[in-house]
Image: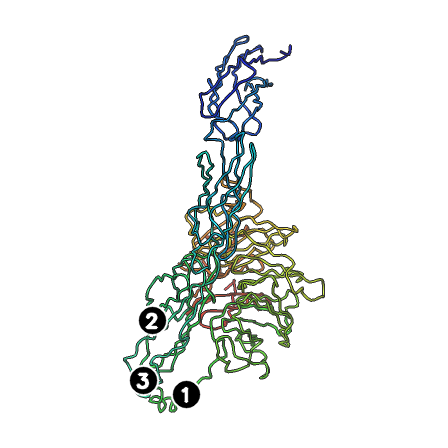
């Protein structure tokens, strides 16, 4: 014992012999308190190579009571199981003696000899990889290790059980010779059949090992068949009419039209499908789906009947209704169907044919006839308003009809189609309808346009995000195509949902339906690169539709928002930005598949983030008052790093979704619009919170959902452009002082 030691400890023996399966063995440890104060003692037994979680010994007592100086505590250690499974030989045990009251510990060493447990335990079989993965028709190796703990060589027969025999390449049996005290590896090859014969799931299997002495031992594993393939989606036909043929006499019996939707399961996932019929026209029709939820067997074609019943007018013009049919699959691991949606068209004729009304129309045409205004042919997805493009001011709009239009503003504040495509450049849009007029057409694409962005300062170039993920741009003044940007590594046709420039116009951010963010850059006065410089992605389980982007005033923090009411912050000042999720302080908020943050925006020259959601709320957070949230005990792969920020304001704007919010440049007002058709200005305080003393000002009430807003200020006040589901682009003037 060291003279200055505060803990004196000794063992009752220096060596032990233990046979697994036999009686337990024990030894004693005596500990004496050599300090000048009361102290309690505890023991820890460590074996080299033993698992920390292994419960192989019993200690009595667990912790001693506090002992006065000079008193002794006797511990008893009982060895119940081998500390190292399947090990035969000598292992050193370290006995660690410590005290919470004393600043030192003692360590003692004991030799433990482990003997074989018996003839029946001399054989071991194991699977180095207990969970294997394979695609249909791919070969996977199942490695098996066999260990002989005996002193004699052993001949072992291995069998692979539980899996279909036809899956195994060659025989389901292996015979191997295992030398004494040695380990040998064998392999089984497994090739699952084609995807239409093997559903994606876990398939348990058993490896049985048997030697000549009659010892039998098993090891269990799992073969996971990975998902592969796609769900093919077709509509037959895509266009119908009511009645089926153009009527020449009054016809009031035809009230509905039927479409047959065909799904072929070309995957190995057993699926069920729910259908959502979307669009403004769908809200005004009676929709029947049979069956409401269809099962999709592997490799088979499943029909679903869609019946649409609109209200037929007695008189008037025929109407063409558009419906977007979206299938929702029960298992989204392979993404959506192919294609993701189908557009159906239904032409509805009035009950009384038009020719009966011609006499009346011709009589009053001179009085009431007004030319059909130029407009989009489908819902407007994005509008941008510029005062410095060369045509002052100017509105650019984009629509589901795959066209971009430009509008000049007259002195009276009306919109006037600006410019026109040449006849040679005019093509059918993605709706298979040729525009009746080229006036005001800036560009026609073959994909619906989801987002727009004007290049800052000069505003002479417009960039458009398309349904298939491509970004196209044109010169606003000439209509000349400039760029086509697409990630060459993207094979998903992931639709672009938002575009955002930095103030110097050298970086363009784009967000997508998968939640991916891409950064496109160009050196000063040089063209943009044809592939993204950075691609910001989330782990698969956290992906979401990123509907809106916002950049902080210092341009160091990029915020993406969208599905599941998820707000993700990226520090784009770093070369490899990592995501942080903004934790919502209100636990009652809905955060399911159909819950969204539709729009996010930063207050001008302030770290205040505003977000509008599908429950009709607008929320403000102060990003200067944020703290990292301590991770929970879940594994890191099960969560995103979270950050909590001070909530400034939260108030109810509407009973339905709020689609767009914008700050005025002086930060005095927040303008909102959404599904209720209301465009409203909300007064803000100097601290950028809602001013409860001021009533909101109603700017406009529109008959349809407002999908997009933009605003500018000039010497005439605040101009606000809006786009809505009724295919109309409108201009509004807001005077805060009125």
Give the distance between the C-alpha atoms of the residues marked 2 and 3, in whole angstroms.
23 Å
Q: Secondary structure at mark 3?
A: loop
Which residue is found at the position 66% from the left and 51% from the top? 575
Q: Quadrant of residue 326?
A: bottom left
Q: Is residue 132 left or right of residue 501?
A: left
Q: Nearer the viewer, mark 1 or mark 3?
A: 3
Residue annotated with mark 1: 367
In the displayed structure, would residue 443 be above or below residue 296?
below
Q: Secondary structure at mark 1?
A: helix
Which residue is found at the position 71% from the left and 62% from the top? 523
Q: Nearer the viewer, mark 2 or mark 1?
A: 2
Residue 62 position in % (x across, y down): 47, 20
Q: Who is closer to the viewer here, 599 or 39? A: 39
> In what quadrant of the picture does the N terminus appear?
top right
Residue 605 position in % (x across, y down): 61, 54
For the image, the number of numbered tags is 3
**Is the residue marked by circle 2 packed among few (<14), some (14-19), or many (20+) residues within 10 Å?**
some
Give the distance between the C-alpha atoms of the residues marked 1 and 3, in whole angstroms.
23 Å
Which comes before the other along the chain, label 1 or label 3? 3
Q: Are marks 2 and 3 in contact (CB under 8 Å)?
A: no
Q: Nearer the viewer, mark 2 or mark 3?
A: 2
Residue annotated with mark 2: 307
Q: Secondary structure at mark 2?
A: strand
Q: Is residue 701 left or right of residue 635?
A: left
Residue annotated with mark 3: 352
């Amino acid at each position: 014992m060291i003279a200055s030691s505060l803990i004196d400890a000794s063992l009752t023996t220096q060596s032990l012999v233990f046979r697994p399966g036999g009686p337990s063995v024990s030894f004693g440890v005596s500990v004496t308190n050599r300090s000048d104060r009361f102290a309690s003692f505890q023991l820890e037994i460590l074996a080299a190579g033993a698992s920390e979680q292994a419960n192989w010994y019993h200690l009595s007592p667990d912790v001693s009571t506090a002992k006065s100086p000079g008193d002794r505590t006797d511990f008893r250690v009982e060895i119940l199981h081998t500390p190292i499974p399947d090990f035969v030989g000598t292992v050193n045990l370290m006995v660690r003696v410590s005290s919470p009251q004393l600043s030192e510990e003692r360590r003692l060493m004991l030799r433990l000899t482990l003997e074989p447990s018996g003839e029946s335990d001399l054989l071991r079989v194991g699977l180095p990889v207990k969970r294997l993965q394979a695609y249909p028709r791919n070969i996977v190796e199942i490695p098996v290790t066999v260990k002989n703990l005996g002193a004699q060589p052993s001949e072992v027969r291995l069998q692979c059980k539980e899996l279909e025999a036809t899956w195994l390449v060659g025989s389901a049996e292996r015979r191997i010779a295992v030398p004494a005290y040695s380990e040998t590896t064998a392999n089984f090859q497994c090739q699952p059949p084609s995807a239409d014969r093997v559903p994606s799931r876990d398939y348990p299997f058993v490896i049985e090992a048997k030697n000549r002495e009659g010892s039998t031992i098993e090891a269990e594993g799992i073969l996971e068949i990975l998902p592969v393939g796609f769900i093919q989606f077709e509509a037959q036909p895509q266009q119908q009419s009511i009645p089926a043929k153009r009527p020449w006499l009054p016809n009031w019996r035809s009230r509905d039209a039927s479409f047959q939707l065909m799904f072929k399961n070309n995957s190995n996932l057993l699926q069920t499908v729910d259908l959502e019929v979307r669009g403004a026209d769908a809200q005004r029709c009676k929709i029947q789906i049979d069956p409401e939820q269809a099962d999709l067997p592997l490799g088979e074609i499943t029909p679903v009947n869609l019946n649409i019943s609109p209200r037929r007018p007695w008189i008037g013009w025929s109407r063409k209704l558009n419906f977007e049919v979206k299938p929702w699959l029960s298992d989204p691991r392979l993404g959506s169907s192919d294609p993701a949606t189908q557009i159906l068209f239904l032409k509805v004729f009035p009950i009384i044919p038009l020719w009966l009304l011609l006499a009346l129309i011709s009589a009053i045409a001179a009085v009431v006839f007004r030319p059909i205004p130029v407009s989009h042919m489908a819902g407007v997805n994005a509008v941008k308003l510029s005062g410095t493009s060369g045509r002052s001011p100017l509105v650019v709009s984009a629509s589901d009809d795959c066209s971009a239009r430009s509008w000049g503003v007259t002195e009276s504040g009306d919109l006037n189609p600006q410019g026109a495509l040449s006849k040679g450049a005019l093509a059918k849009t993605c709706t298979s309808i040729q525009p009746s007029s080229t006036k005001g057409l800036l560009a026609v694409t073959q994909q619906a346009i989801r987002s727009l962005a004007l290049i800052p300062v000069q505003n002479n170039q417009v960039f458009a995000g398309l349904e298939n993920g491509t970004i196209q741009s044109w010169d606003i003044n000439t209509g000349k195509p400039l760029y086509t940007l697409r990630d060459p590594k993207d094979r998903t046709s992931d639709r672009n949902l938002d575009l955002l420039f930095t103030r110097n116009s050298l970086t363009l951010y784009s967000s997508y339906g998968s939640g991916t963010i891409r950064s496109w850059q160009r050196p000063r006065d040089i063209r943009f690169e044809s592939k993204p410089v950075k691609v910001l992605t989330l782990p698969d389980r956290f992906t979401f539709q990123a509907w809106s982007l916002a950049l902080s005033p210092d341009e160091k923090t990029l915020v993406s928002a969208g599905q599941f009411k998820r707000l993700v912050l990226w520090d784009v000042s770093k070369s490899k930005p990592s995501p942080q999720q903004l934790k919502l302080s209100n636990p009652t908020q809905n955060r399911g598949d159909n819950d969204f943050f539709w729009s996010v925006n930063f207050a001008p020259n302030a770290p205040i983030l505003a977000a509008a959601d599908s429950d009709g709320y607008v929320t403000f957070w102060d990003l200067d008052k944020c703290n990292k949230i301590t991770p929970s005990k879940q594994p890191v792969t099960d969560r995103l790093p979270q950050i909590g920020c001070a909530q400034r304001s939260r108030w109810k704007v509407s009973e339905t979704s709020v689609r767009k919010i914008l700050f005025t440049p002086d930060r005095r007002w927040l303008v909102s619009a959404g599904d209720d058709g209301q465009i409203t200005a909300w007064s803000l305080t100097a601290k950028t919170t809602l001013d409860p003393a001021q009533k909101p000002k109603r700017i406009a009430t529109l008959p349809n959902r407002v999908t997009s807003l933009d605003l500018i200020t000039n010497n005439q006040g605040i101009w606000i452009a809006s786009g809505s589901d009724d295919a109309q682009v409108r201009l509004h003037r807001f005077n805060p002082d009125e």
